Image (tube, rainbow, N blue to C red):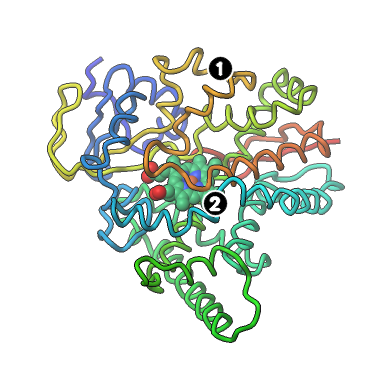
């Protein structure tokens, strides 16, 4: 097969229907894929190439953002910045995301999962994404950002179009729906930040959450600008909610599809963290994200001109037979140490800060399902997420007895 005949982009129906096969074909026959659809970009699919690129941030810059569109440098945070700014931004929030701090949320997350199941258990069937997998991380984000938990529906209505815009040629300008989501988000969070600033000035007790941290942290005596704080809130909300929702849906889906693995897990609940990790490897919730190369480079004989958008396919690195034995087998009893080397949380300096939090949410959610709904099974075809760079379900009908 001529490598030029392999079609890939996030909107391509073949990829949407069977991403695993398309990634395998690319890895094998066309490890540096180039396309002009929907706008020019390259894609790396071999684990070794992706890891090497992500560890070389001088060549593979994040300054034009993680999406297909070139975002304006200096506007976005974290995944849209390079050192030294990136390092400062990471330091500003890393304390909140340390595993030791996150672990303290376990009881609250467990209470939340119990409450959610109490609310729908008697129905005997439902959509586990809408009723369980989505509200968990969104509620946790409300705790972190200090917004009312009753607003999770509103927050999700912005997160979904924002996530879709990552694979869109025009990014934040992709469509009226995307533009409106950003606009409404900035208005809501603009007001919310002002209210918190007033509370800080009032001398009353202030929540010790992520928002207070963002408003008070200083670098060389300087506080973050309101624009930056809005950028943090926007990115964290998108990064921390739908990804974790997909992860919870994906692990439940694989377990329901693989009854022997599900039975093994029920008989050995100590494998729950491993099941979460294997799900992350097997079904990376983020297929891939983009970098922009600062200079011309040649990989496997393919010339990649400077300033190209290049997608790093985390999901493909996780299925690379050069890195994993039986990569296409879902096996919750893989060696836990090795398993954590999957690329689903990224690689190198942009490694996901929320990894301990999402692992905790996944663990608590799965434990609750096993204890409360052990006979959960599929109840009709699921529907897939419409965000091109994401993998997982928009709805996952289930029943139990
Ligand atoms: C299963 C759930 C999650 C997945 C699959 C995931 C995936 C990722 C990936 C792939 C990156 C690297 C981006 C890049 O290299 O350009 C990343 C970065 C990041 N994630 Fe997550 N994430 C998840 C959950 C979370 C949560 C819960 C939070 C916080 C509430 C979070 C916060 C972040 C932050 C702050 C970064 C940026 C780090 C940096 O640029 O230095 N993530 N995530």
Foreground pick, 110 / 390: 110
Foreground pick, 14 / 364: 364
Determine whether the residue tagged by mark 2 lies in a helix, strand or loop: helix
Image height check: is 287 above or below 132? Answer: above
User: How far across and down, in percent of the image, does residue 170 sit?
Assistant: 30, 56
Image height check: is 289 above or below 213? Answer: above
Determine whether the residue tagged by mark 1 lies in a helix, strand or loop: loop
Quarter of the figure that contains the N terminus: top left
Tell me the residue that label 2 is attached to. Answer: 97
Image height check: is 399 above or below 136? Answer: above
Q: Is residue 332 left or right of residue 222?
A: right
Q: Is mark 1 within 8 Å of ligand 1?
A: no
Residue 169 shows in this picture: yes
Residue 242 shows in this picture: no
Q: Is residue 384 left or right of residue 1?
A: right
User: How far across and down, in percent of the image, does residue 246 sit?
Assistant: 57, 42
Q: Residue furthest bottom?
A: 202
Q: Is mark 2 within 8 Å of ligand 1?
A: yes
Q: Earlier in the sequence, mark 2 or mark 1?
A: 2
Q: Is residue 56 left or right of residue 191?
A: left
Image height check: is 29 above or below 348? Answer: above
Q: Residue at x 42, y 18 (%)?
A: 323
Distance (Cα) linking label 2 and label 1: 32 Å
Tell me the residue that label 1 is attached to. Answer: 329
Q: Residues within 10 Å of mark 1 (few under 14, many from 20)?
A: few
The mark found on residue 360 in the picture is none
Q: Residue at x 41, y 33 (%)?
A: 314
Instruction: Tell me which corner region of the image, top left, top right, bottom left or bottom right, holds residue 290.
Output: top left
Quarter of the figure that contains the C terminus: top right
User: How far across and down, in percent of the image, does residue 141 sit?
Assistant: 59, 58
């Amino acid at each position: 097969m001529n490598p030029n005949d392999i079609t890939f982009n996030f909107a391509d129906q073949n990829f949407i229907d069977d991403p695993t096969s398309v990634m395998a074909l690319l890895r094998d026959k066309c490890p540096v894929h180039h396309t002009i659809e929907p706008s020019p970009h390259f894609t790396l699919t071999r684990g070794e190439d992706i890891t090497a690129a992500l560890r070389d941030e001088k060549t593979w810059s994040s300054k034009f953002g993680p999406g297909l569109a070139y975002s304006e440098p200096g506007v976005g945070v974290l995944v849209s910045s390079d050192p030294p700014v990136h390092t400062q931004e990471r330091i500003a929030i890393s304390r909140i995301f340390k595993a030791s701090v996150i672990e303290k949320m376990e009881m609250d997350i467990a209470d939340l999962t119990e409450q959610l199941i109490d609310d729908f258990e008697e129905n005997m069937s439902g959509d586990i994404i809408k009723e369980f997998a989505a509200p968990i991380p969104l509620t946790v984000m409300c705790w972190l950002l200090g917004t009312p938990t009753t607003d999770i529906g509103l927050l999700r209505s912005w997160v979904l179009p924002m996530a879709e815009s990552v694979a869109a040629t025009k990014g934040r300008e992709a469509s009226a729906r995307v533009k409106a989501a950003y606009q409404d988000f900035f208005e809501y969070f603009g007001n919310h930040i002002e209210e918190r600033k007033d509370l800080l000035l009032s001398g009353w007790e202030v929540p010790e959450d992520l928002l207070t941290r963002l408003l008070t942290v200083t670098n060389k005596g300087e506080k973050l600008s309101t624009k930056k704080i809005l950028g943090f809130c926007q990115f964290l909300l998108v990064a921390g909610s739908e990804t974790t929702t997909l992860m919870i849906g994906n692990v439940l889906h694989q377990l329901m599809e693989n009854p022997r693995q599900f039975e093994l897990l029920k008989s050995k609940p100590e494998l729950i963290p491993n099941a979460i990790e294997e799900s992350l490897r097997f079904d990376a919730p983020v297929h891939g994200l983009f970098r922009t190369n600062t200079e011309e480079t040649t990989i496997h004989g393919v010339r990649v001109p400077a300033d190209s958008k290049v997608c790093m396919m985390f999901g493909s690195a996780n299925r690379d037979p050069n890195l994993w034995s039986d990569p296409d087998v879902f096996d919750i009893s893989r060696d836990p140490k090795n398993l954590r080397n999957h690329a689903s949380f990224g690689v190198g300096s942009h490694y996901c800060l929320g990894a301990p939090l999402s692992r905790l949410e996944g663990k608590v959610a799965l434990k609750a399902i096993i204890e409360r709904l052990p006979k959960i099974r599929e109840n009709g075809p699921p529907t897939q997420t419409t965000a091109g760079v994401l993998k997982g379900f928009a709805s996952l009908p289930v029943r139990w007895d």
